[in-house]
Image: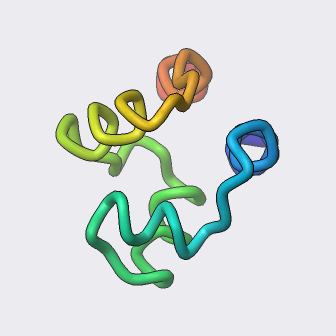
Amino acid sequence: MFEREFVGELKRLKLKRYDVCYILQCTMPTLKSRLKNPGNFTLNEINNLKECGFELNYIYEYENN
Protein backbone atom coordinates (compact mmCIF):
# COMPACT_ATOMS: atom_id res chain seq x y z
CA MET A 1 0.00 0.00 0.00
CA PHE A 2 2.49 2.59 1.15
CA GLU A 3 4.99 1.60 -1.50
CA ARG A 4 2.40 2.20 -4.25
CA GLU A 5 1.82 5.75 -3.01
CA PHE A 6 5.56 6.32 -2.75
CA VAL A 7 6.12 5.13 -6.33
CA GLY A 8 3.38 7.53 -7.44
CA GLU A 9 5.28 10.38 -5.81
CA LEU A 10 8.49 9.25 -7.53
CA LYS A 11 6.74 9.40 -10.90
CA ARG A 12 5.16 12.77 -10.14
CA LEU A 13 8.55 14.21 -9.18
CA LYS A 14 10.39 12.34 -11.96
CA LEU A 15 12.78 10.73 -9.51
CA LYS A 16 14.22 7.25 -9.25
CA ARG A 17 14.75 5.22 -6.09
CA TYR A 18 18.49 5.83 -6.35
CA ASP A 19 17.78 9.57 -6.26
CA VAL A 20 15.85 9.07 -3.03
CA CYS A 21 18.74 7.04 -1.60
CA TYR A 22 21.02 9.98 -2.35
CA ILE A 23 18.57 12.43 -0.74
CA LEU A 24 18.23 10.26 2.37
CA GLN A 25 21.90 9.25 2.39
CA CYS A 26 20.95 5.60 2.70
CA THR A 27 21.44 2.38 0.78
CA MET A 28 18.84 0.75 -1.44
CA PRO A 29 18.23 -2.08 1.09
CA THR A 30 17.55 0.55 3.78
CA LEU A 31 15.10 2.38 1.53
CA LYS A 32 13.30 -0.88 0.73
CA SER A 33 13.06 -1.60 4.46
CA ARG A 34 11.60 1.87 5.10
CA LEU A 35 9.02 1.36 2.34
CA LYS A 36 7.90 -1.92 3.89
CA ASN A 37 7.61 -0.30 7.32
CA PRO A 38 7.09 3.47 6.91
CA GLY A 39 7.10 3.98 10.67
CA ASN A 40 10.87 3.54 10.53
CA PHE A 41 11.42 6.78 8.60
CA THR A 42 13.20 9.29 10.82
CA LEU A 43 11.99 12.87 11.16
CA ASN A 44 15.12 14.04 9.36
CA GLU A 45 14.36 11.72 6.44
CA ILE A 46 10.76 12.90 6.26
CA ASN A 47 11.89 16.53 6.30
CA ASN A 48 14.41 15.85 3.51
CA LEU A 49 11.70 14.25 1.38
CA LYS A 50 9.32 17.17 2.01
CA GLU A 51 12.02 19.62 0.95
CA CYS A 52 12.29 17.72 -2.34
CA GLY A 53 8.57 18.05 -3.00
CA PHE A 54 7.16 14.79 -1.65
CA GLU A 55 3.61 14.97 -0.33
CA LEU A 56 3.87 12.76 2.71
CA ASN A 57 0.44 12.90 4.31
CA TYR A 58 -0.03 9.23 3.51
CA ILE A 59 2.89 8.25 5.78
CA TYR A 60 0.84 9.37 8.76
CA GLU A 61 -2.24 7.56 7.47
CA TYR A 62 -0.42 4.24 7.20
CA GLU A 63 1.32 4.66 10.54
CA ASN A 64 -1.92 5.42 12.34
CA ASN A 65 -3.85 2.45 10.88
**Where residue 16 sits: x, y (%)?**
67, 66
Q: Is residue 34 above or below residue 4?
A: below
Q: Is residue 11 above or below residue 18?
A: above
Task: Name the foreground residue: 2 vs 16.
Answer: 16
At a point 27% along the width and 69% down the height, the residue shown is: 25
At a point 73% along the width and 50% down the height, the residue shown is: 14
At a point 54% along the width and 31% down the height, the residue shown is: 54
Where's the C terminus, which quadrant?
A: top right
- Colouring scheme, one of rainbow, by chain, secondary structure, one colour: rainbow
**Where residue 64 sits: x, y (%)?**
49, 18
Q: How many marks?
A: 0
At a point 57% along the width and 57% down the height, the residue shown is: 35
Where's the N terminus, which quadrant?
A: top right
Left or right: residue 14 compared with residue 63: right
Q: Is residue 14 above or below residue 12?
A: below
Left or right: residue 17 compared with residue 46: right
Task: Name the foreground residue: 13 vs 65.
Answer: 13
**Where residue 28 sits: x, y (%)?**
49, 81
Q: Residue furthest front?
A: 14
Q: Residue furthest left?
A: 44
Q: Is residue 25 above or below residue 34?
A: below
Task: Name the foreground residue: 58 vs 10.
Answer: 10
**Where residue 8 sits: x, y (%)?**
81, 41
